[in-house]
Image (spheres, rainbow, N blue to C red):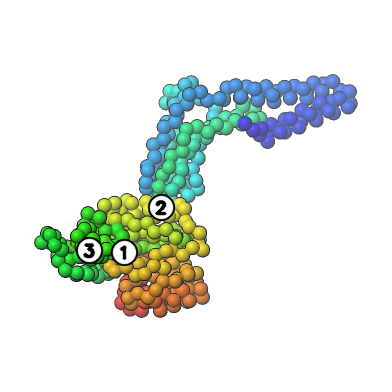
Amino acid sequence: MRITARGWAVLAAAFGLAGTGWRLGVGELVMLGIISLTLAFASLLTIAASARPHQITVVRRAPAQLFCGQKTAVTLQIIPRKRLDGGVLTDLTPAALNASGAQTLARGNALELKYAITPTQTGHWALGPLRWQQSDVFGLWVVTWMLGEATRIVAWPRLTSLPVAGKFAARQVPVGAASGASPDDVTLREYVPGDDLRRIHWPTTARKGFPMVRENAGTTKKSLRVLIDPALLANQKTREWALEHGASVACSALDSEHRVEIVGGSQVDFIDCQITGRQQILTQIAQLAASPVSPGKTPAVANSRPVPGVITYAIVSSNFAFKGGSTTSGSNHAVVVGSSRDTGQTAENLRNSGWRVLHLAKPIPHQAAWAQQTTREPVGV
């Protein structure tokens, strides 16, 4: 409960009248001051007694996941034991959800609050709790109650379909036919994080001392590791673009039957897309947006040794501290985002290590960045 500006003005006037009347010996002014004070405190007691909500049930209907830019309706049902009058209902929402079009409908004693949300930023967000504000008849006091629980929703990044098919060449590592394997499983290769554990060939694994998996002849595709530099997430100018580009590349690769890994910060999270699919990829990227690692930390994957059958697609900032070893020329891709003055050294270090580099002074449309990155002609600023 708090006093309003009008309430402060009434209290100041009451004390002023009472004080002036006392000093001048004018009883009428003293009486007016006392009446004003009595009015203010009577309003306080009245609103304190009448505004307390009793046994109010709040039911919120909202989506669990939605894409940025997707307008979706949210509905709340407020069911009190007795009718609520004279209050203002507001469902607390972060600015990133861009709430609009609120309206309140009365249905008997119950109330229904409707509005729309259109997320503008990827991440995990909270809707609520419900705020109910009520003032006394004179507008001297305002009481606020928080009702119900918050509802968590996930805002996924916007997706752009990219022509991934054929960009990452198929690759096999034949090591001899597996004993006891089916006719279709004629090759073995070293396990890559994200492989289906059910395809591990245990006899060969035991003999070699490291996991080996069965692969169908002629169908092996390289796994794609999408790396998002946390420094880009700390910059509002590049945050959404990096998340959208990473999600678009990952989901387009998934649609082309590549295995996909999402990497951000110093922790590596592997996703077996054969089991989890697109939804987990999007949720993983939203989680990365919700809790980015300190920009000073270099993603671990950039410092690890090259893995057979895995291509890294890195989306990094101009101050990215690359420490990785050399790789097969053109097999790994890096999009460096930053001013031309700053990107030079980072791009040069990556290029000298065998990476295919596209450096951008500022974000450009995803189709254009993808086309420049995967074309055979040299790319630059």
For the point 47% across and 49% down, the residue is 96
- Where is mark 1, residue-wise? 224
Q: Quadrant of residue 187?
A: bottom left
Q: Nearer the viewer, residue 264 or 100?
A: 264
> Foreground: 139 or 219?
219
- Residues marked 3 and 1 touching at CB (< 8 Å): no
**Separation of residues labelled 2 and 1 (CA atoms):** 19 Å
Placement of 31 over or under 218, stated as above or below? above
Discs 2/3, front? 3
Q: Earlier in the sequence, mark 2 or mark 1?
A: 1
Mark whose residue sits in front, 3 or 1: 3
Q: Amino acid at mark 1?
A: Leu
Q: Nearer the viewer, residue 284 or 40?
A: 284
Residue 300 placement, left or right of 177:
right
User: Which residue corresponds to the image point at 89% horizontal and 26% vertical from the top-left?
Assistant: 24
Task: Name the disc covering residue 207, or none.
Answer: 3
Q: Left or right of 341: which side holds 7?
A: right
Q: Position of residue 304 (x, y in %)?
A: 39, 67
